[in-house]
Amino acid sequence: MSADVTLEDVKQDAGIEEEEEQIDLAPVHRIIDSLKETKGMLIPVLQDVQTVYGYVPEEAANVVADRMRLYRSQVYGVLTFYTQFHLTPRGRHIIRACSGTACHVRGGKTVISKLEHMLGIGHGETTEDMFASFEKVACLGACGLAPVIMIDNDAHGTLDSVKTERIMDNLREMDTMKRAE
């Protein structure tokens, strides 16, 4: 991989298009300035950047590379290797549906289909209104609750289509009320 690879190259290869927007990069500089030594600190720096923005914007990744004296391709290599990092904005709610064996045999496919239908998106996508991002995961570690989903940090188990719909309707209602405050 060339040292001149940019996030734009990665996005183009992945077929991702988005509008340009200006972001405040001061938090990125503060994160790096707070370190006494940056050597070996790339992942913690990127985690802190993602905490601030909710994802790692291209401009922030470029500042990290420049300030830490790394090739941009090194930074993008880490960002694209680890699934914990996101290169595009994510929804206000992260919905993870288990597709592991226990969930699958207990009706997880029906739950996943219901979520995809209700959200109007598939795996790895975010709703247009930024309400939610949806991910299918191999295991949530709650096999006794199968089929199970996680909404943000809350597990919901022993699901079927009706329970899934009720949970999602409640989430949407709570989200609407919170945003109206």
Image: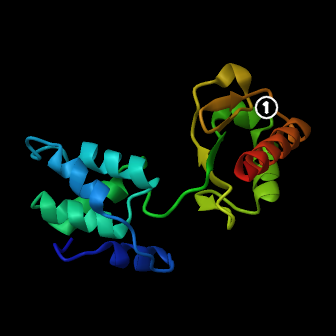
Q: In this view, does 90 lie to the left or right of 180?
A: left
Q: Nearer the viewer, residue 115 or 110?
A: 115
Residue 44: % across, % down: 26, 42
Q: How crowded is mark 1: few (under 14 residues within 10 Å), some or many (20 or more)?
A: some
Residue 146: % across, % down: 73, 28
Q: In the figure, residue 122 lies in which quadrant?
A: bottom right
**152 over 67 or under it: above or below:** above
Amino acid beneath label 1: Arg
Residue depicted at x 24% and y 60%: 75
Q: Residue furthest front?
A: 181
Q: Is residue 15 left or right of residue 69?
A: right
Q: Which of 143 and 12 is in front in this view?
A: 12
Q: In this view, does 95 lie to the left or right of 28?
A: right
Q: Residue furthest top?
A: 144
Residue 121: % across, % down: 71, 62
Mark 1 falls on what kind of element?
A: loop
Residue depicted at x 71% and y 51%: 179
Q: Is residue 82 left or right of residue 116?
A: left
Residue tagged 1: 106
Residue depicted at x 20% and y 67%: 72
Residue 132: % across, % down: 66, 53
Q: Which of 35 and 163 is in front in this view?
A: 35
**110 over 146 or under it: above or below:** below
Tell me, yes or no, if residue 77 can be seen here: no
